[in-house]
């Protein structure tokens, strides 16, 4: 019984799929293009290529945001590596700076063409903590303002416990 039902369903799908109810107009030719896309003239193909450069044609801002997120991620990893290798003793606490151990996380945000660095720490937000947070700025500016590969970092802020701003500074070279 199951075979009979399967054969009937298959036969019905075959018949429906093979039937073509479209009538050809007297001067038309059948479409021999097997793909579902229509072939376009070269000038339309060029425009289609330009449009496809933006993956989300209906929302170009979304594609731009995705690009910004990729830049943020790449630069954040680059900065983390720079800090780890130059100030974190490359994993050896004996060679690490006194302040490196307080870095919990680093994040770079893109705002138009400018970058903002945020350093997250576990430092208590009192006067002593705010003073200690000032030690984070020179290494960040050293990374951002390198002559061989300058970054457009305009602002750095250091966050303490409970996400309270300990210190912030604009780029001294701008």
Image: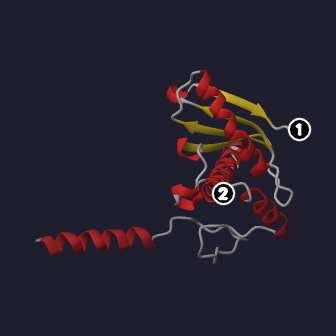
Residue 23: x percent and y percent?
A: 59, 66
Is residue 54 or residue 1 the one in the foreground? 54
How many residues crowd mark 1 within 10 Å: few (<14), some (14–19), many (20+)?
A: few
Residue that mark 2 sits on:
86
Residue 8: x percent and y percent?
A: 24, 71
Left or right: 147 in relation to 28: right
Total marks shown come to 2
Residue lying at 66% horizontally and 28% vertically, measured from the top left? 131
Looking at the image, is 36 positioned above or below residue 174?
A: below
Left or right: 29 in relation to 146: left
- Tell me the CA gap for discs 1 and 2: 25 Å
Residue that mark 1 sits on:
174
Q: Are marks 1 and 2 in contact (CB under 8 Å)?
A: no
Is residue 25 or residue 10 the one in the foreground? 10
Looking at the image, is 95 positioned above or below residue 40?
A: above
Q: How is the image coloured?
A: secondary structure
Left or right: 16 in relation to 101: left
Report the quarter where the N terminus lies. Answer: bottom left
């Amino acid at each position: 019984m199951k075979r009979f039902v399967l054969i009937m369903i298959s036969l019905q799908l075959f018949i429906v799929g093979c039937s073509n109810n479209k009538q050809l107009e007297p001067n038309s030719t059948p479409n021999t293009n097997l793909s579902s896309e229509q072939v376009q003239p070269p000038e339309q193909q060029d425009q289609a290529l330009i449009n496809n450069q933006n993956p989300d044609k209906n929302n170009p801002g979304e594609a731009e945001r995705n690009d910004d997120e990729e830049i943020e991620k790449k630069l954040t990893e680059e900065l983390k590596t720079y800090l780890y290798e130059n100030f974190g003793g490359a994993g050896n606490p004996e060679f690490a700076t006194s302040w490196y151990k307080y870095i919990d996380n680093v994040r770079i945000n893109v705002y138009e063409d400018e970058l903002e660095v945020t350093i997250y720490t576990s430092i208590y937000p009192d006067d002593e903590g705010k003073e200690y947070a000032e030690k984070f700025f020179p290494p960040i500016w050293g990374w951002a303002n390198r002559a061989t590969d300058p970054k457009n970092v305009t602002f750095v802020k250091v966050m303490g416990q409970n996400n309270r701003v300990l210190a912030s500074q604009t780029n001294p070279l701008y």
